[in-house]
Image (spheres, rainbow, N blue to C red):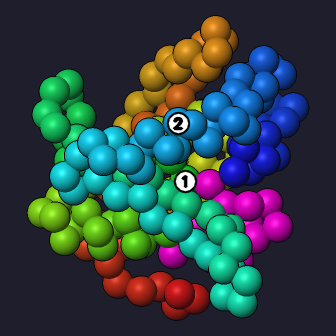
Amino acid sequence: MISANRHAFAGLVPEQCLRWITPQESADNWRRTISPGGMAEGDCLLVAEHESSAEVVGFALARVRRGGGDDRAAGELQVIAVSPAFQLQGVGRRLVRAVAAHLASVGVSSMLVRVLSVNPNRTFYERLGARFLREEPRDWNGVVLPESVYEWAELSPLLSPGEDD
C-alpha cells in the first residue's frame, strides 16, 4: 500500500517523505507486526479484500493505548490505507467501523487518529464524527510536519451501520 501513501501525499510533502521506505522494508516491517509478539492483546489489523479476486484493497491497524500522556482515548487508529483504485467506494469507512467494533469488543470506548494536517482526506474522519483535538509536530524522515489529532470520544456512533454501509 505504499502506492496509496504516495498517491495521497504527492505534491503535498517533500519527496524525501514519500521515498523513505522501499517495498521490501515495508514488507519486513509488516512481517514483524503480524509475527507473534508484534501486536499486543486487543490490537488489530483488518484487511479489506476485493470480492471476486481476494486482492487486498485496504487495511487498518489499530492499537489499544496503554496509558500515558493527556490522550483520553483508549484506542488509536494508527494506519489506514485504501488502494487508489478503490477509494471513494466506502472501503475506508467500513474499515474504520470495523476497527471501532473490534475495539469496543475488547472494552475500548474511544479512539484517536493522527493525520497529517496537509492531508486533504482528513475531513473523512470529521464526516465519521471525529472531533479535532489539537495539532502536534511529526517528524517524517527528517521533515517536521504538523499533524492533526482527532478523537471519537465515544465509539458507539461508529457501531451503527451508516446508510451506505
Q: Is residue 35 one of those drawn in magenta?
A: no
Point out the residue furthest to the top here: 142
Amino acid type at mark 2 = Asn
- Element under label 2? helix
Q: Which sits in the foreground, 13 or 53? A: 53
Give residue 80's mark.
Answer: 1
Picture mark count? 2
Amino acid type at mark 1 = Ile
- Which residue is depicted at the point 71% across and 23% down? 20
C-beta proximity under 8 Å, tags 1 and 2:
no
- Which residue is depicted at the point 49% across and 58% down? 60
According to the image, label 2 marks what residue? 29
Q: Nearer the viewer, mark 1 or mark 2?
A: 2
Q: Position of residue 100 (x, y in %)?
A: 33, 66
- Which residue is depicted at the point 23% across and 46% down? 40
Q: CA distance from mark 1 to mark 2?
A: 15 Å
